[in-house]
Image (cartoon, helix red, strand yellow):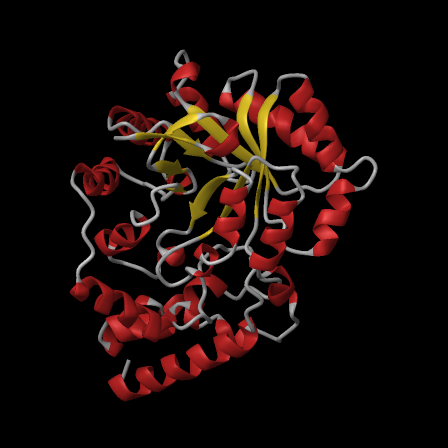
């Protein structure tokens, strides 16, 4: 595994990172096993968040006694200083450390977020003070809104930017990433599989490895998944014409209006299982309709509970018209159910 400099942080990190959301599904012993396997295979950068349930605790246990061997990034989604400080202190406890290498303000996608963060007593003020105290080494930011991300990069307040990047959502390479490079910000790529919509890992990483200064942070939920993704870095990257055709096929199938399964929209106040139901259209194309109907029966049967209250739309970082999309997917599911006698 090659090493690289993470922008102006000066941190030396592996060319491939570790996204910690999937380890929340594992028991502690298995999560530690996966984390340590990643380290054995050369991964030194671990990205988590206060909101990722017990992932910080699992990382803290996995790397206890070897803190100087890994680079740990975590996040807060809170905008007020008091709340952000509480998150930071909790992260320090859970991670069993007295400092965070990279502390990120999470999902800053609207002007109102930035106004709240920079207001007197806001999170930015508190984090700068924590940095002066040595509790934080570097401050970064994440966003799902490209125009807002550009504004954040240009404020001069941050050392890194984390943004979705994959062969379906690749617009960041044209403006956001060049702006970040010009200011020597480290670049982190979340959602390398487009929230699970790209089910060909080899193809996903053929694309990503064309951008060697962009640190991808895929999630891993098994030793096998670690070994699979690390193996892509064992040989030179080659993108063939067939690969380009395959990537374009995914783009045509998904377009830009699709669910990335980030789950920010949930929970639904009316009990709709939004995330799996939002995936029915894609799943039905990849599976035979009879299989798709049964596979997603339980979530699809909750869709009629939707009253289009708009709560999910307000929380969606991609501004998806979720109620409309749910209705479209439900109508397709219902048609398939009738046609297949299921």
Does 147 sit left or right of 326 as displayed?
right
Q: How many marks?
A: 0
Does 30 sit left or right of 97 as displayed?
left
Report the front residue among 187 and 292: 187
Say if 238 sits above or below 17 in the image.
below
What percent of the width, then of the height, locates residue 85?
69, 29
User: Considering the image in quadrants, where does the C terminus appear?
Assistant: bottom left
What percent of the width, then of the height, locates residue 292?
29, 72
* Residue at 16%, 40% in the rendered image: 235
What percent of the width, then of the height, locates residue 271?
55, 64
Report the front residue among 273 and 79: 79
Say if 137 sits above or below 332 in the image.
above
Report the front residue among 271 and 91: 91
Say if 326 sits above or below 10 in the image.
below
Can residue 267 be seen from the camera position used here?
Answer: no
* Residue at 63%, 43% in the rendered image: 77
What percent of the width, then of the height, locates residue 310?
65, 70
Does 173 sit left or right of 157 as displayed?
left
Q: Residue furthest right?
A: 120
* Residue at 37%, 36% in the rendered image: 18
């Amino acid at each position: 595994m090659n090493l690289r400099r993470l922008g102006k942080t000066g941190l030396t990190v592996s060319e491939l990172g570790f996204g910690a959301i999937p380890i929340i599904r594992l028991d502690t012993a298995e999560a530690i096993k996966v984390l340590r396997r990643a380290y054995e295979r050369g991964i030194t950068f671990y990205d988590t968040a206060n909101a990722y349930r017990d992932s910080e605790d699992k990382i803290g246990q996995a790397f206890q006694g070897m803190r100087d061997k890994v680079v740990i990034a975590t996040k807060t989604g809170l905008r007020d200083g008091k709340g952000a400080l509480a998150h930071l202190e909790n992260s320090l406890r859970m991670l069993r450390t007295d400092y965070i290498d990279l502390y990120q303000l999470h999902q800053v996608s609207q002007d109102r977020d930035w106004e709240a963060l920079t207001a007197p007593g806001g999170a930015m003020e508190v984090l700068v003070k924590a940095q002066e105290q040595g509790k934080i080494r570097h401050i970064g930011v994440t966003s799902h809104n490209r125009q807002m991300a550009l504004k954040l990069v240009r404020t001069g307040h941050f050392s890194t930017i984390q943004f979705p990047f994959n062969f379906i959502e690749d617009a960041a390479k044209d403006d956001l990433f060049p702006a970040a490079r010009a200011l020597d910000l480290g670049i982190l790529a979340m959602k390398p599989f487009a929230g699970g919509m790209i089910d060909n890992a080899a193809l996903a990483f053929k694309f990503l490895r064309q951008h060697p200064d962009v640190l991808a942070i895929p999630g891993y939920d098994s030793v096998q998944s670690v070994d699979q993704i690390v193996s892509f870095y064992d040989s030179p990257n080659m993108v063939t014409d067939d690969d380009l055709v395959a990537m374009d096929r995914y783009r045509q199938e998904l377009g830009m209006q699709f669910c990335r399964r980030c789950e920010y929209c949930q929970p639904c106040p009316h009990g709709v299982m939004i995330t799996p139901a939002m995936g029915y259209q894609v799943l039905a194309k990849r599976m035979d309709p009879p299989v798709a109907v049964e596979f997603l029966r339980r979530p699809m049967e909750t869709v009629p509970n939707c009253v289009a209250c708009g709560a999910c739309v307000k929380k969606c970082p991609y501004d998806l018209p979720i109620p409309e999309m749910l209705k479209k997917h439900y109508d397709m599911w219902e048609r398939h159910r009738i046609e297949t006698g299921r």
